[in-house]
Image (cartoon, coloured by chain):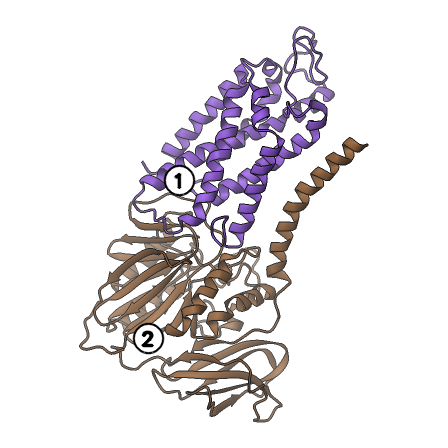
Chain colours: A purple, B brown
Amino acid sequence: MTTAIIHPFYLILILVISLTSSILKRIWKTESKNNSDPDGLLKKKNQPDEDSPQEGQSTTTDLQITPGQLTVKLRRQWRFHAFFYIIIAMATYFTVYQLLIKKSINLANINFLIIPLLLSAIISTVYFVKTVLIAPTKFSLVIHVGIIIYEIIVYSFFIHRYFDFFYLFLPFLLGPLRILFWKKEVKPLWDHREKFTKIINFRVELLFWVLCVLEVALQYKGYSLIVW
Amino acid sequence: VKKIAKQLIGTISILGILTGLILASSLDVSVLNPEESEPWALFGEDPSHNIIISWKSAEMQYPAVKYGISPSNLSKTVFNFTQSTIHHLLLPSLLPNTKYFYQVGSNNGNPTFQGDSSSKMYEFYTAPIDINTTVKFMAISDSQQIAGNGYTKRIADKLGSVASQNRLVMNVGDMVEDGSIESDWNDFFETSAGYLGKTIFVPVAGNHDSNLGQASPTPKPTILENYFPISDSKNHFYYSFNYSMIHFTIADFTWPEDSQVGPEQLEWLDQDLTNAQSMPYSIVAFHCPIKDSAFFGNNYYMQNRVRPILDKHNVTLILNGHDHHYERVEEYGLTYMILGGGGTVQDPFVVPIPESKVIEFGPTYASFTANSTYLNVQVNTLEDNLVDQFNLAPRIHNQGGSE
């Protein structure tokens, strides 16, 4: 099967953008949520949610959104970067597979590729698992699995035919849909966020960010963490 | 207040690091390079006897070049009594297949060389007349620095370390990011000084270097021709020359559009390759690829107008760039090399085509050795790992051979 082989440099370049957004979100949420709920989504039962009306208390329908609610809902689009991680993870897996099986691919410069590939594989897999499995709502599970299937179809059938990188990132256009269906997202099917945020805490995330920024900067100057 | 202060410091630190890295890279290209440059040598009309020495000075100057076959005895001097900042001096009546040494300086409007006797010594080889002489040369492409990316410097230094053993170095286009900006050229000459002063430079126009012939709605002034005044045409940047057993054709296909692949250049290419039929090897270099595994690898004008001419004349090897990775493609008996590992940021992705034999991401450069039995091609990484190696047979076999 012929498909696209993404240059690993670009995978960590996108990771830098995505991790920066995550880190900034952590910085602005950490103090108030005691570092255990960076998404601001943990809600104890019967605890009033300052962001949203509780189930049964809502007097508006999904499509009747006041400007105030819209602001809150747009703020929730921070979670939009979950799409990044799914796409990067899929791109990493397909790229590693292609690098291993494609005869015409030469790996003489593997020293320049290995750190970006490792970082991308580790970080994107961690967030991929988080995005899809840690606290899925019905809606997010459907949309995230939909994106995974979409990416498989694009890599398998479209990208080599139409040769357009944009197809990989088309799911970003689905982001605004979450505003409309947001109320349905409040209840997770199951919830392991607390465990996850204890393991992948702020320091670990900062370490990921530093490693990615350092590797991008070094690659840009013709080096790598293992090439000096 | 403390909480907000902490949050602000955290945010500024994160964004400040990113901004600082971007700024530091940009300054390298746009600000930190001197206006004057070290010299580069170009082939004149007869590469065996005429070489053009060029360089840039920061101030207006009457240029002068002192040269000879021994570094301790630079017995000849040429002058130009017109002031300029970009200098081109033709060294005439040189001996063929001979190593020359030279220094650049100025004059006061009269024939006296002004320059420090301890100033830097440069060198080049003239072309041999004997068409059986073994030739070594190197090629890269796409060395443009978008914002101080460092592969360019590392590749240039690598070429500089072996340039003296090679008769010429070719850059198959996109030497700079924006060919209409002086600072980009200052950066190119500064970065490439290590090899430019040790051998002959063979430039090929890229779409970033020049927009001659492009149907651009907003044409920009191009200054490529000011630095390399060797084109046979004012409408395009093309020329050709023989070097030992190889006929080099440098064409100006920088972008796959109708006006670029027009009749003037196609007729010239056809005629030039017809005239070179007696040469054992024919190497044609132009920037835009005819076929490869990346973004520019499949275009109508190149495949339907240029390829039939190359096929008709049984061209030995086609050197391209434009796409930013290394690749060898073999199709219809033609061999293409895409030399896009010359320093710039690499392609975001490739989709390997069946005709592709080797693909490599990252910094690479190509070395060639031509003798009467084969043209050997080697592509290496910065760390001297072998990326690709193959031999091409001559079109016509000559008798004998010499080093």
Position of residue B26 measured from the top left corner of the image (x, y, whole percent): 61, 56
Indicate the quadrant where residue B319 lies: bottom left
Label 1 crowd (10 A; few <14 / some 14-19 / many >=20): many
Position of residue A129 measured from the top left corner of the image (x, y, whole percent): 49, 25
Q: Secondary structure at mark 1?
A: loop
Residue B242 image label:
2
Q: Which is more toward the observer, A131 or B72?
A: B72
Position of residue B370 measured from the top left corner of the image (x, y, whole percent): 28, 70
Indicate the quadrant where residue B79 lies: bottom right
Q: Is residue B184 above or below residue B257?
A: below
Of badges 2 and 1, the one in the foreground is 1
Left of A22 or right of it: where is A69?
right
Residue occupied by mark 1: A4
Position of residue B59 measured from the top left corner of the image (x, y, whole percent): 65, 78
Q: Secondary structure at mark 2?
A: strand
Label 2 crowd (10 A; few <14 / some 14-19 / many >=20): many
Q: Is residue B205 visible?
A: no
Q: Is residue A165 above or below residue A50?
A: below
Mark 2 touching mark 1, by CB under 8 A?
A: no
**Residue, x 63% and y 34% (percent of image)?**
A23
For the residues tagged 2 and 1, is the chain the same? no
